[in-house]
Image (tube, helix red, strand yellow):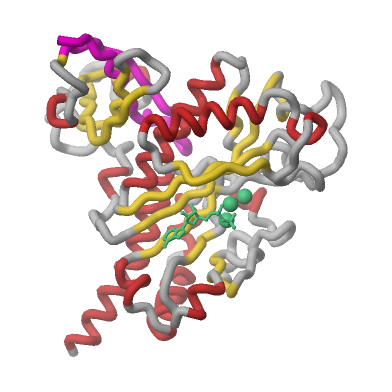
């Protein structure tokens, strides 16, 4: 028998942005445990804004697990938060609101800033560094500094070793700003792995005494870049049937549901989606082929293939909850596909 360190990880009840929480229990197994072997566990919900003091137990239900590359015999156990009955999802459990759809694929592009002493890593103690321009996909100490690349490389290795489908890295437009991409097939997979990747990044940064700033416009109303989390999405229908009429119905549904989307695309998004700097204004829906200034960018390949493939919603921001984003995108798509089936049946 081997003693495994099981790190149970969940999202707390803070609004509008949940925090990652985790605690360890040691359990013996013959070999690396299966998901089914991992027991439910409890925690004090009154310490995480998930319960009142009186009856404060919440339940942790393991839903995905990964080897923890940073720990000997470590297991990362991603959990959903359940009510004390163990079967009713807690209201903070947004994963439970995502439609099950194996044919839904998501790719999230997470942008973020490294922060040290209350400002972006590499910013001088007073004032600003040289203006934006050379930092995006840049190389060299004066562009990316001495430690940022070391962290993103270590993070990439941790994600790959854990089996997370990390797809790439780039340094971003502002100094101290970076991006990574996570892709997954299945309606919950990319969102699960995004939360896991965020956890690994934040934990890794502890030893550097550096924080991750996810706010979408941490430098406020300046020309310094904001942070997004573009959501690339496709369904089986979009990839294999598609068509111009379907696409236009889909865009009409996105326009109609604008408020529902913006409500879950991350807080303070009006600070970022101003209509300037390759952003569409938050309160006006638009789409365009290869248009990085639209709410939804339609890749060239989508039109070339007869309106089939994936689309990129550029509005979600870096602080958004990928569970809520995926949930809303699939709801809007489902409203169109349901209407399609009805008219086919009529
Ligand atoms: P850009 O910065 O040009 O917008 P990236 O390469 O950073 O593009 O991100 C593109 C994302 O789109 C990746 O996460 C990729 O996995 C995702 N993607 C590609 N094809 C599909 C698809 N068919 N369905 C959903 N997402 C997709
Ligand atoms: Mn990108
Ligand atoms: Mn980017
Ligand atoms: Mn993008």
Residue 127 in the figure: left or right of residue 310: right
Residue 27 in the image: above or below residue 62: above
Q: Main secondary structure of the magenta part?
A: strand
* Rendered-image quadrant of the C terminus: bottom left
The structure residue drawn at horizontal position 46% and vertical position 42%, both measured from the top left corner, is 166
Residue 215 in the image: above or below residue 117: below
The answer to whether residue 173 is seen in the rendering is no
Question: Which quadrant of the structure image shows residue 310?
Answer: bottom left
Does residue 2 show up magenta in the picture?
yes
The structure residue drawn at horizontal position 54% and vertical position 26%, both measured from the top left corner, is 154
The mark total stands at 0
Question: Which quadrant of the structure image shows residue 90?
Answer: top left
Residue 249: image x %, image y %? 41, 79
Does residue 196 show up magenta in the picture?
no
Q: Nearer the viewer, residue 112 or 145?
A: 145
Residue 21: image x %, image y %? 39, 23
* Rendered-image quadrant of the N terminus: top left
Q: Which residues are magenta?
A: 1-28
Residue 163 in the figure: left or right of residue 259: left
The structure residue drawn at horizontal position 34% and vertical position 60%, both measured from the top left corner, is 330
The answer to whether residue 172 is seen in the rendering is yes
Query: For the view shown, which residue lies furthest in the bottom direction?
Result: 346
Question: Which quadrant of the structure image shows residue 247?
Answer: bottom left
Residue 322: image x %, image y %? 42, 46
The structure residue drawn at horizontal position 54% and vertical position 42%, both measured from the top left corner, is 180
Q: Nearer the viewer, residue 113 or 32?
A: 32
Residue 102: image x %, image y %? 25, 56
Residue 3 in the image: above or below residue 274: above
């Amino acid at each position: 028998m081997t003693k495994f360190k099981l790190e149970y990880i969940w999202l707390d009840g803070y609004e509008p942005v949940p925090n990652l929480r985790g605690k360890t229990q040691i359990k013996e197994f013959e070999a690396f445990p299966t998901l089914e072997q991992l027991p439910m566990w409890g925690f004090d919900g009154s310490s995480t804004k998930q319960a009142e003091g009186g009856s404060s137990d919440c339940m942790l239900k393991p839903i995905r697990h990964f080897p923890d590359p940073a720990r000997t015999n470590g297991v990362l156990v991603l959990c959903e938060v359940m009510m004390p009955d163990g079967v009713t999802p807690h209201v903070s459990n947004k994963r439970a609101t995502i439609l099950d759809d194996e044919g839904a694929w998501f790719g999230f592009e997470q942008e973020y800033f490294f922060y040290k002493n209350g400002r972006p890593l590499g910013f001088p103690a007073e004032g600003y560094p040289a203006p934006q321009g050379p930092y995006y996909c840049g190389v060299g100490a004066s562009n990316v500094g001495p430690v940022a690349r070391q962290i993103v490389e270590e993070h990439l290795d941790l994600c790959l070793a854990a089996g997370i489908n990390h797809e790439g890295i780039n340094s971003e437009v502002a100094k101290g700003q970076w991006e990574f991409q996570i892709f997954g097939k299945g309606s919950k997979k990319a969102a699960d792995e995004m939360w896991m990747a965020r956890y690994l990044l934040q934990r890794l940064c502890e030893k550097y005494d550096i924080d991750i700033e996810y706010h979408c416009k941490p430098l406020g109303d300046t020309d310094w870049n904001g942070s997004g989390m573009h959501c690339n999405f496709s369904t089986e229908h979009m990839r294999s049937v598609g068509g111009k009429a379907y696409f236009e119905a889909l865009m009409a549904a996105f326009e109609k549901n604008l408020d529902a989307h913006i409500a879950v695309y991350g807080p303070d998004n009006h600070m970022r989606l101003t209509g300037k700097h390759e952003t569409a204004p938050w309160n006006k829906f638009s789409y365009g082929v290869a248009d990085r200034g639209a709410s939804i960018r339609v890749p060239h390949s989508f039109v070339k293939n007869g309106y089939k493939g994936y689309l990129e919603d550029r509005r979600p921001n870096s602080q958004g909850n990928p569970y809520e984003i995926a949930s809303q995108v699939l709801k809007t798509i489902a409203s169109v596909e349901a209407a399609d089936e009805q008219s086919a049946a009529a």
